[in-house]
Image: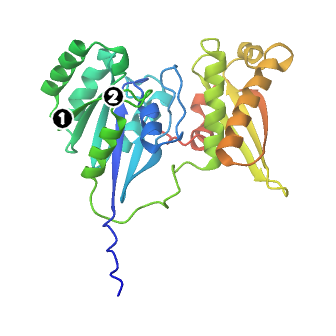
Amino acid sequence: MTISQAEPETCCGVVAVIGAPNAGKSTLVNALVGQKVAITSAKAQTTRARLLGIALEGSVQIILADTPGIFAPRRRLDRAMVSAAWDGAQEADAILLVVDSVKQRRHELGPLLETLNARPERKLLVLNKVDASRKEALLELAQEFAGAVDFEEVFFISALTGDGVAELKRHLAGLMPQGVWHYPEDQVSDASERLLAAEITREQLYRQLHDELPYDSAVRPESYQTRPDGSIEIHQQIVIGRDSQKPIVLGKRGARIKAIGEAARKELAELLGVKVHLFLHVKVEENWAENRELYEAIGLDWVK
């Protein structure tokens, strides 16, 4: 006679990952998921729209809302990004405040801590980049922030090296309420492949142009289709604000845009597991940050 083993009860919940720009939120989400779902860059405010990463820990599914950095908004694009960040924290089962323990960005953290203190969700403090910080300074920082907000726990991690990430993930799993999983076991993000492809191109745009190209650029998805041979053909538009920026993106005889496209194509092929044909072209659109259609294309709500 065979005695059947009872299936473990499943749990599922939402964790909002917030912080100042460039605190390492996307790197942390990627580390918790176990693979890349969000783009990263040394450039501040890389994340624009709210993106969900889906992590598994045993019978627990943790839905991670990777949010744009919270800062003082000046333009419509800024307001849309900050709105997306706080929307990601609505009714979360836990909020992770990720702090760059090296740069700290206190001018942005002050107002953020005030707002966070008034919120009802359970809150955890994550001090990131501990591999580059002195232990005494970290403890002082933890004590200071714990005095400003009622954090349930403080975690010291390095999202880049993985130090402390497994412990944080186990703790988050323990906080998730009992319930059915919201996503299939093999799904790691809620982003469509079309939007993810545009984000990967934007990441290469930032990485290869560094400070040559201002933050005011976007990648608009145009078409995404599967060819009869199973390969994928993708057309995207790199949107910039001024004619003077076009030679920067194109490079000498088109060398720069070719390198951006090749790096993005290679990463997409590895990610999707099929051959990718990527076609990029540059469009100058002076007021693209006021274009409602473009906001929808890149996953942001139109905020007045």
Residue 102's x, y, as percent? Answer: 35, 14
Please tell me which residue is depicted at 66% across the width and 21% down the height of the picture: 241
Q: Which residue occupies the extreme left position in the image?
A: 147
What amino acid is labelled 1 in the image? Phe
Residue 179's x, y, as percent? Answer: 32, 65
Dividing the image into 4 quarters, which one contains the C terminus? top left
Looking at the image, tell me whether mark 2 or mark 1 is earlier in sequence order: 1
The image quadrant of residue 212 is top right
Res. 304 in view: no
Please tell me which residue is depicted at 73% across the width and 36% down the height of the picture: 265
Q: Is residue 150 left or right of residue 37?
A: left
The image quadrant of residue 10 is bottom left
Res. 167 in view: yes
Residue on which the image places disc 2: 157
Q: How far apart are marks 2 and 1 (CA)?
A: 16 Å
Q: Which residue occupies the extreme bottom position in the image?
A: 1
Mark 2, Cα crowd under 10 Å, few <14 / some 14-19 / many 20+, is: many
